[in-house]
Structure formats: C-alpha cells, structure tokens
Image (cartoon, grey):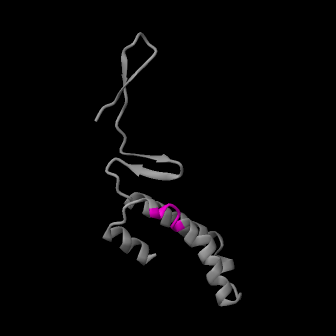
Amino acid sequence: MKISIPSKNYGRPKQLENLESFEYLGSMLTHDGRCTCEIKRRLAMAKAAFNKKRALFTSTLDLELRKKLVKCYIWSIALCGAETGTLRAVDQRHLEKF
C-alpha cells in the first residue's frame, strides 16, 4: 500500500515507502501487526537487565526479597506494553519459557 501526501515542491504528491517494521514510542511495530518481534525484543532486554544485576539476584539476600527485586526490575521490562498487542499461542509459549 502506497500513501500519497501533498508536498511543497509544486503540488506533486510524494510517495511514502513501505516498511517491514519500525519503532514507535519504544515498541516495535511490524507490517503484519503481530507482536512476536516485540515480545522477543522485550525478553532479550529483560535477560540483559538480569545479567547486569546477576550478582544482586544470586546473592545471599532473603529469597522473598530477591523475588520482589526480579518482579520489579526484570518482569517490568519483559511485560511492558504486553497488554496492548494480540497474544497468540506461540507468543504465550515464549513468555512462559522465560
């Protein structure tokens, strides 16, 4: 689908290009509207955040405190914006494996 918009160069319409995906307000949007790419991206960000704080999460702190820290720092990254997209069975399995 091509969209024409008026341009300032003598009234000729300017053609916009089609994109496979682009980032908008921190979320990855794809041409097919699926969330698989975004979910994989968020899980990778959460794993990176865990690896940054690995010493904290694997320390001798109380187990309940470590659970709260993981929920606060890791799951908030992984699930950010998850309620805005369509969750397919494949995507749900990705989240459950994490």
Q: Quadrant of residue 96?
A: bottom left
The answer to whether one can see residue 70 in this image is yes
State the image coordinates of residue 66 (x, y, percent, origin top left): 65, 83
Q: Residue at x 33, y 66 (%)?
A: 88
In depth, the one of 96 and 45 nearer the eye is 96
The magenta stretch spans residue 82 = yes
Q: Residue at x 69, y 78 (%)?
A: 56
User: Residue farthest to the front?
Assistant: 84
- Where 22 sits versus 37, above or below? above
Q: Quadrant of residue 60?
A: bottom right
- Where 35 sits versus 18, above or below? below
- Where 13 sits versus 85, above or below? above
User: Residue farthest to the left?
Assistant: 1
Q: Quadrant of residue 37?
A: bottom left
The magenta stretch spans residue 38 = no
State the image coordinates of residue 16 (x, y, percent, origin top left): 37, 30
State the image coordinates of residue 78 (x, y, percent, origin top left): 52, 67
The answer to whether one can see residue 58 in this image is no
State the image coordinates of residue 28 (x, y, percent, origin top left): 45, 52
Q: The N terminus is located in which quarter?
A: top left
Chain part drawn in magenta: 78-83
User: Residue farthest to the right?
Assistant: 61
- Where 32 sits versus 1, above or below? below
